Image: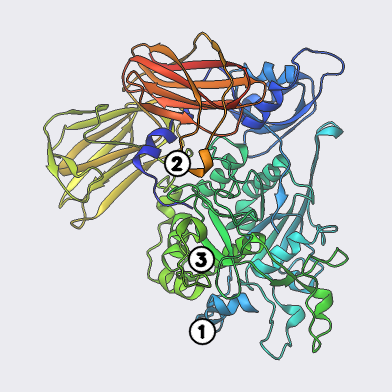
Amino acid sequence: MRTKLSSILIGLGMVGSFATQAQALLGPELAEKLSTTSLTQSLTEPSIKVIISFKDKQQVYNVMQSLGVPYLALKELPMVGATLTPSLVTQLQNNPAIESIYYDAPLRYYNYNSGEITGGHFVHDNYLFTGKGGVVAVLDSGVDATHPDLAYGDKTIQNVKLINDLDLYGLTADIEGLPNTDTSSGHGTHVAGTVAGSGAASANDPTRANLHDGIAPDAKIVGISAGEAISILHSLKGFDYALANQHKYDIDVITNSWGGGAGSNFDPNNPVNKASFEAYKRGMIVTFAAGNDGDGDDTLNVYAVAPWVIDVAAGTPNRMLADFSSRGVPGDAIKTPDITAPGSSIYSTRALNTPLPALGPVIDLDNPDYYVYYATMSGTSMAAPFVAGAATVLLEANPHLSPDQIDEILKASADDMFDETGRQYLPHEVGAGHINVKKAVELALQTEGNMRQFLAGDTEFSSQGAWQQADNTADKVYFAGKWSETTDSSAYNGTLAKAKGPGNIAYVGFKGERAKIHFAATNRGEVSILVDGVEYESLSVSGEKGEAITVAINQLDDSAHTLEVRTISGQVALDRFEFDGIVTQPGVSFTTQLMPSIEGTMGPSVSLDLAGLGVDPAYSIIEHLVSVPDNVVGVTAVLSWQPFADLDFSIANSQGEDLASSATLDNPETAQLSVTEAGDYIFKVKGYTSVVTNYRIDWQIVTQD
């Protein structure tokens, strides 16, 4: 999980939350495939595997039945997997029930020491915390629960094989109760042993009883087998199973040692990110392998950079960063690992009758049986499950910790890391540092858990990454009655809005499903919270000086709402509102309007650096002036082109200053802007490397009615 984002990221991050767009959002990979595929319906029209996200799960059946194609609907998530022709994709894109359509891209798995160098064995032996009561869902190739360390019915309490094949008329099944679901890879079995292997096959080792146990040897495992050839749909099925069975098996953590899209930007609308957010919102800790695409910058697994997951880099036995471990981007709060854990030459359980991993079996002349039961592997695949197991150890120490608190504790207790020259590693390389289980447990014991507040909606992150802020100085927050502004250094923007006695009202409009209201505690104060004129909660805002009080509003429908704070008695000090959505005028609705497309031609251009002298690259810029009318709150513009070229795109104000931009290698490029005033804006198309290139800009505006 990331730290709080800057105010700039907060402003831009919410633009993607407009749910009233006229067309469904197309994922970049799918858009690229469609741009190179004829949309003419024919008998030979190619088919594409896609993931379709609906705005409402109740609409799935009618929409998909109308298409007349096999499909696979998830149980908990409002998503469907299907194989569609480009024509059907275009038809769905114009269906108002559809939120987004993404390509079902293939993904890949990331392939006695750990307990010692992290203080884990000290915690087991002295604090007696071993993950008892914790349950980790291992979403991977499978688990061989015939292994004595992962025995089915004892250690592995459920082992399910997910079967879903869109080429077989939407065949889907969850085959539960299988002793062995890891029959060809061994990856998931090694991961499961790292989390919570009992060490039974090494029980009599003279070095230490149960020498090769996991970091949480008394935790339980739910094996979720996505198979050896994982894709986005397989991973979504795995998350869907964990969500549906969270309370049946008391799942605390979902660990994921797979991914793809190294270096890609965070996309909150990606189906995998939507699934991991749903798990986070429901109180489950989600760990992801950072990826094995190091040692260059900007190589992180695209699913590990979601702010609400724990992004785990891999360390060596001497507590340095492994060369293969993916790195982030200096100064980028999103593209930064959270923490580093052991991931190099990790001993763990070997799935019987599967190929040996690259580093081979564990050879121990005193214990020849280890050849059969254990193997050594390296990768962030081994680091992520270590953190997942450590999380259950922290939950045993303090069962009331929320996912946000687990993340904060792991990072606050981490050790600094240094390379062989003595240089301290930077945050974009190792995150907060190397995990220290002993220090983390000690900090967990001193922390007051807030899981109840978390589940009520008081989460660190919103579905878009950051909450939209509106404090007492925002122009869309309205006050009625006797309010005054006072300076307070602890307030979000340095000031509080204060009122005494009953009848004072502060209100704001927003569009979204969740909100939070922050107060500074007073000696005596009581308020009533209303949503759309109906009382949501009455509560005291009294407390110690300096104490912050947060009210979370959860599970609203994704439409326009008016949120009110009404003072009942005493003194009330209002700090700010936060929204998982966009701030609006109170009592308004929205309309999305497609604007006329803009077409143009970019001439030849090429990037230059004369003899490495730092000369600015040569490029061409074409500007298009557009007018944005009154009441517009958002603009989304998509630049697409043919043939091959490297074009960047931005939206600027009338003075030419960029306000929103997209500078990737993707085609199309999408720029989104939260609009604060009407007037002229400029669409800038910048060509770095191109032949003569024809392009088109499709854009739409979101207007408050």
Q: First in sequence: mark 1 or mark 2?
A: 1
Residue 126 bears which disc, if any? 1
Does residue 429 appear left or right of residue 456 in this picture? right
Residue 485 placement (x, y as % from top left): 13, 38
SS class of the residue under badge 2? Answer: loop
SS class of the residue under badge 1? Answer: helix
Q: Is residue 113 above or below residue 617?
A: below
Residue 585 placement (x, y as % from top left): 31, 22
Residue 12 in which image quadrant: top left
**Outermost residue toward the front?**
611
Q: First in sequence: mark 3 or mark 1?
A: 1
Q: Is residue 671 above or below residue 601?
A: below
Q: Amino acid at mark 2?
A: Ser
Mark 3: give few (<14), some (14-19) or many (20+) Cα within 10 Å: many
Tag nearer the camera, 3 or 2: 2
Q: Is residue 359 above or below residue 581?
A: below
Q: Is residue 18 above or below residue 221?
A: above
Q: CA distance from mark 1 to mark 2?
A: 38 Å
Observer-nearest residue: 303 or 322?
A: 322
Does residue 423 appear left or right of residue 675 in this picture? right
Residue 165 placement (x, y as % from top left): 82, 38
Residue behind mark 3: 395
Q: Amino acid at mark 3?
A: Leu
Residue behind mark 2: 462
Say whether marks 1 and 2 touch (CB < 8 Å): no
Mark 1: give few (<14), some (14-19) or many (20+) Cα within 10 Å: few
Residue 339 placement (x, y as % from top left): 51, 61
Q: Amino acid at mark 1?
A: Asn
Q: Residue at x 38, y 17 (%)?
A: 681
